[in-house]
Image (cartoon, rainbow, N blue to C red):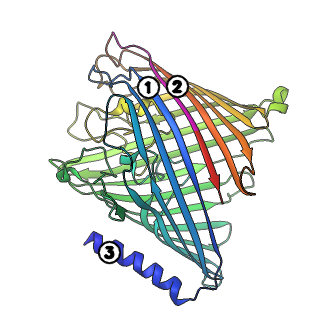
Amino acid sequence: MRRVTALAVLALLLCSSMAFGAAGDFTYGGDLRVRESIFSNNPLPNGGTMPDFNFFRIRPRLWGNYGISDNMSVQAMVTNEFRHYVDPDNETWDFPDEWFIDNLYLDINDLAGGKLDLRIGRQNLIYGTGKVILDGTPGDGSRSIYMDAIKASWSGFENMTVDLLGIYNSAENLLVINGQDRNLTNYTGQDPDLEMDELGIGVYLKHKGLSEGWPMEAYLLMKQEAEYGAAESSTINTIGLRLMPKLSDSLSGNLELAYQMGSQGDIDKSGYMLDAKVTMTVAALEQYKTKASVGLYLLSGDDPGTADDEAWTPAFSRWPQYSELYIYSFATHPGSVADWQNVMMPYVAVSAVPHAKVSSTALLGMMQAPQEDGVDGTGRGILFTWWNKFKVKEGIFREKDSLSGHLLLEAVMPGDYYADDADTATWLRWEFIYSFK
């Protein structure tokens, strides 16, 4: 049934573009991403250690947009990602792997007197800093983040927009060529019995603020996860508020609070999240656009002394967030990579632009576990990340193309939450992206 539904949507969009004639504007583009990731000694709460990895990822993408009319267009994107593993030997992502429909949606804008916009189909949804809604396909890493969704945006209220969301994510992408049966909603292996479909319904409000310089957002998201394997189906409802105050010309902030409640079988679920940061422009280093930040990230953990589950559940947000390396340290069971929960991390960060084509951000965080469910204590360890992003050149082969990249270094010095002999975990990744349009 899911395959029939997906193909029917595809046919509907294509037929719609044909029905409105071939006189509309057509634009296209694409990119090619090449990266290598090397990491080692990543500790696990059960006292073990992740295997060391060294692998290349090559991801080509092509997209096109056809303007059917002044207020209607179709966007499509096809993607592939194949890999080469240096260590360990792994052939599961070998060339040519699979080509799949990454985005395919219909935009209908300016309805109801210009107050209503609709986006229907496979699309990327990112809200706020991505702590609740960002990635609908965590099972393939950063290869894709799409969600099969309908989004209705209403701007008929003064100083406020309201988005209504309906999401249905299948564990398997059915619009593929040379399909590899990838499990996209979870890291639960290739066993079909462990596939988990997801359903989400939500409302997201964006307001310019009750007073100038105090924009705010609020949301309600209801998510249901289908049963998979021995796990029963679960529901989790998340309500949240985000404030982004501009306190002065040199001082700004971000504060997001969220609470969850739901159930999985006979188990009651709840959880909370706090994401806070204050950022100051460093006047003495203004020529380098230097900014310093102090923040706190706090996610509840499951109290082992109760029959309920009090751990935070990342709804559609199982992605690296603050660390590419540390997401694997949540992997206490299949399906839990990037399962952010039971962590408290105060941190400091500094960002700068030392050159017109280079930007750099360093973060140092002290991680704790609110609930003692590791090997011994609650000290998760010290996290260090260093992002270096650079632009190489624009206008290489055509007017609108560019080559850019980044170098990312990370390290985690484990605390007593892990085994006594746990070594410092390290991560290195370089990347180049060529894009054109």
Prevalent SS, magenta region: strand
Whichever of labels 3 and 1 marks the residue nearer the N terminus, that label is 3
Kindly indicate whether the residue at mark 1 contacts the one at mark 2 (C-beta within 8 angstroms).
Answer: yes
The numbered mark, 2 or 1, whose residue comes first in the sequence reads: 1
Q: Which of 286 and 31 is in front in this view?
A: 31
Q: Is residue 132 above or below residue 104?
A: above
What secondary structure is marked by label 2?
strand
Is 428 contained in the magenta span? yes
Give x and y (percent) for residue 377: 34, 17
Crowd around label 2: few <14 · some 14–19 · many ≥20 (10 Å): many
- Residue 171 location, x and y as percent? 30, 56
Q: Which picture quadrant has residue 28?
A: bottom right
Question: For the residues marked 3 and 1, what is the alpha-carbon distance in whole angstroms?
Answer: 41 Å
Q: Nearer the viewer, mark 2 or mark 1?
A: 1
Quarter of the image for residue 420 reads top left
Q: Report whether residue 241 is seen.
A: yes
Q: Is mark 3 on a helix, strand or loop?
A: helix
The amino acid pointed to by label 3 is Thr
Relative height, residue 336 to residue 260 (above, below): above
* Residue positioned most to the top: 421
The reply to whether dot 3 and dot 1 touch (C-beta < 8 Å) is no
Q: Work out whether 127 lies above or below 72.
A: above
Q: Give the range drawn in magenta.
A: 421-431
Look at mark 1 in the image and give the residue it sits on.
39
Residue 114 is situated, as x and y percent measured from the top left of the image, at 65, 80
Mark 3 and mark 2 in contact? Answer it, CB < 8 Å. no
Q: Mark 3 points at which residue?
A: 5
User: Which class describes the residues within 10 Å of circle 1: few (<14), some (14-19), or many (20+)?
Assistant: many
Q: Which mark is residue 410?
A: 2
